[in-house]
Image (tube, helix red, strand yellow):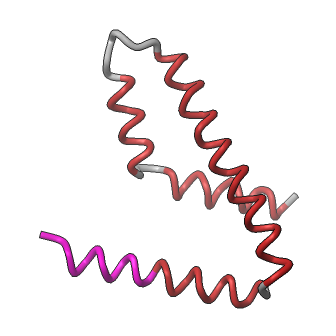
Amino acid sequence: MRGYLMVFLITFLAEMGDKTQISTLLFSSNKEINCLGILAAASCALTLATFFAVVIGSELDRLVSTKTIKVVSGVGFIGIGVWSLLTAK
């Protein structure tokens, strides 16, 4: 159960304030669009994206070690951070 709680917390914190949340907030501010419809659409989109991540991740684990995946992910995140800093205006 602890692993599931960690997945929930990390995903929840990662999604807070990201582009998806901001775009959903903007759509919700449009009074011509039903908020429950926006909630349903955004939830389905996140669920589908998560489904693909789980399927790809479970297959990737068969081909590459978990340590390699963690290292590549870490380097990727650092690279994105450095790129963001270098291209900030």
Q: Is residue 3 above or below residue 72?
A: above
Magenta-highlighted residues: 78-89
Q: Is residue 26 above or below residue 74?
A: above
Q: Is residue 20 above or below residue 30?
A: below
Where in the figure is residue 13, as x and y percent of width and height?
54, 56
Looking at the rendered image, the quarter that the N terminus falls into is: bottom right
Please report the residue visible at 47 percent of the width from the left and 17 percent of the height from the top.
35
Where in the figure is residue 23, as x and y percent of width and height?
37, 38
Please report the residue visible at 77 percent of the width from the left and 74 percent of the height from the top.
60
Q: Residue furthest left?
A: 89
Magenta-span inclusion, residue 80: yes
Observer-nearest residue: 55 or 18? 55
Q: Is residue 31 above or below residue 21?
A: above
Please report the residue visible at 66 percent of the width from the left and 83 percent of the height from the top.
70
4 with respect to 71 (left or right): right
Looking at the rendered image, the quarter that the C terminus falls into is: bottom left
Q: Quadrant of residue 26?
A: top left
Where in the figure is residue 49, as x and y percent of width and height?
63, 49
Magenta-span inclusion, residue 20: no
59 with respect to 22 (left or right): right
62 with respect to 20 (left or right): right
Where in the figure is residue 33, as x and y percent of width and height?
40, 14
Observer-nearest residue: 63 or 7? 63
Q: How many marks?
A: 0
**Magenta segment main secondary structure:** helix
Observer-nearest residue: 37 or 15? 37
